[in-house]
Amino acid sequence: MAGMKRTILKRILNEAAQGNFDTVRKIANLVVAEIPFEYRSYQTFARHFFVTHQPIGTKKILYLVPGFNYGGAEITDCYLIDGLARQGFTVYLVGTDLTVPSKIWYDQFSRSAQVALWLPDFARNPGLQTDFLLRMVVHFGIDLVFNRNSGAGYRSLPKFKQLPYLKLVDLLHTHNFGNDWILYSRQNASLLDRRYVTSDDLKTYAAKHGSVPGHKIQTIYCGTDADTYPPLSERSNRRAAFLESLELPTEAKIVTYYGRFSDQKDPLRWVAVAAKLLAKAPAIRFVLAGDGELLEETKTAIQQQNLEPYVRFTGRLDTVFDIASATDVLLLTSKFEGLPTVFFEFLMMGTPIVTTNVGGVNECISSEVFGFVVPLQASDKEIADQVLRFLTPEQHTSERQYQRRQHILDTFTVNRMQAIYAEELTALIRPVDLLAKRQQLHQLWQQQFRKSLPEPAH
């Protein structure tokens, strides 16, 4: 115990010395979660839950996410769960991590799941969380555990492996040059049957730095729901209406920030680039959409750069169509990424993108028709110069807009992603011997849960 305390304290001091205070906060929350041992209330909830919810369905998946937040990874989760449900899978969905106390998208997450719950509501202690997840596997006869960046899921992998029939997979969207899920999961990830990633860049990184062998890592591009987009012929009218709502002239050149205001997206660097742009092209206006922990700091930086008259904040938007139609260039200055879903959304509306070279961005921005990728260490002036190149009329012809949309239709659609995952997961589950599965579940129930969990009829 003393050794563990020293290890935790050393990690906190190292992270603090590097200025990683978000990581320090997350570690502190996990440590605090160990203190209250809510065993009685947990047992009361568990007894009620496993009587109320009886096993049903086929091809059963326990789908683990950190929380019901919103963002590119969460959009992909919702699409994936919906697609699996329509392909005959039964999805039991659990948000697990105390460090992501968000239920903003609970309704979107839960609409296609058989059961959806957030584990910290009744089990904050990591030991109890693993116990509950294993109970779910036994009670519902889960065929496959799908872990998408869930810390509780990675901690539970050795327990899940007690059932040889049970398939274990995870999905990773991004790496952060060491401070990421690949290194976090290294100790137990060797137990995975498959690791899915969203870019070849991430596949290469994961094979080099993780514990999952390369032949078990597969790239499946995420995508956008192409069926929901309006025709490009509406772009002009949507642009005019959106700019009017923001009291911006239709002849203005619009450069847009769209996403979370977080350290990963580096909005302060974005503001610095905006200042360079305005100095060269006074007709430019800036639209910033989203929210997040750095929103107020971003507004302060805009005041300091005297950009306020040229900037509009929209808050978080429910749909991307209008802002993408109004945008001349989408600018990303991220410190790290996976394969941003915002690329698909803006390209579908014909809008080019200028982005820093992080993650798999080159796999989408693969031609200058679609935009330009600048080095991560490029100067603010160099980034601004590339944005200016895409504000010219020849970059905004109907032909270019349709080329950008077709690029997404060819490779980055939800339908394509859903079909590949359904085929992959079905192939993993199919070889299971049902009699052996029942025997393994019964044996584990006898060993661990016979006194506290009714034996399910699988």
Image (tube, rainbow, N blue to C red):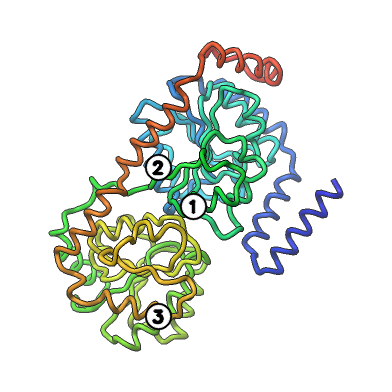
The amino acid type, in three-letter code, at marker 1 is Leu
Q: Of residues 35 and 201, which is closer to you in this image?
A: 201
Residue drawn at the location 20% of the way across and 59% of the way down: 403
Bin the neighbour count of mark 3 within 10 Å (Cα to Cα): few under 14, some 14-19, many 20 and up.
some
Res 341 quadrant in image:
bottom left
Left-right relation of 90 to 438: left
How far, Cα to Cα, is label 2 from label 3?
37 Å
Left-right relation of 80 to 22: left
- Spot occupied by residue 13 in the image (x, y as percentages of width and height): 75, 64
Kind of element beneath mark 1: helix
Kind of element beneath mark 2: helix
How far, Cα to Cα, is label 1 from label 3?
26 Å
Bin the neighbour count of mark 1 within 10 Å (Cα to Cα): few under 14, some 14-19, many 20 and up.
many
Residue annotated with mark 1: 202
Instruction: Determine whether label 2 and label 1 are within 8 Å by CB.
Output: no
Q: Which mark is residue 78?
A: 2
Left-right relation of 422 to 268: left
Residue drawn at the location 43% of the way across and 48% of the way down: 198
Residue annotated with mark 3: 382
Q: Is residue 64 visible?
A: no
Res 164 quadrant in image:
top right
Q: Is residue 305 above or below residue 353?
A: below
Count how many numbered circles sit on residues in the image: 3
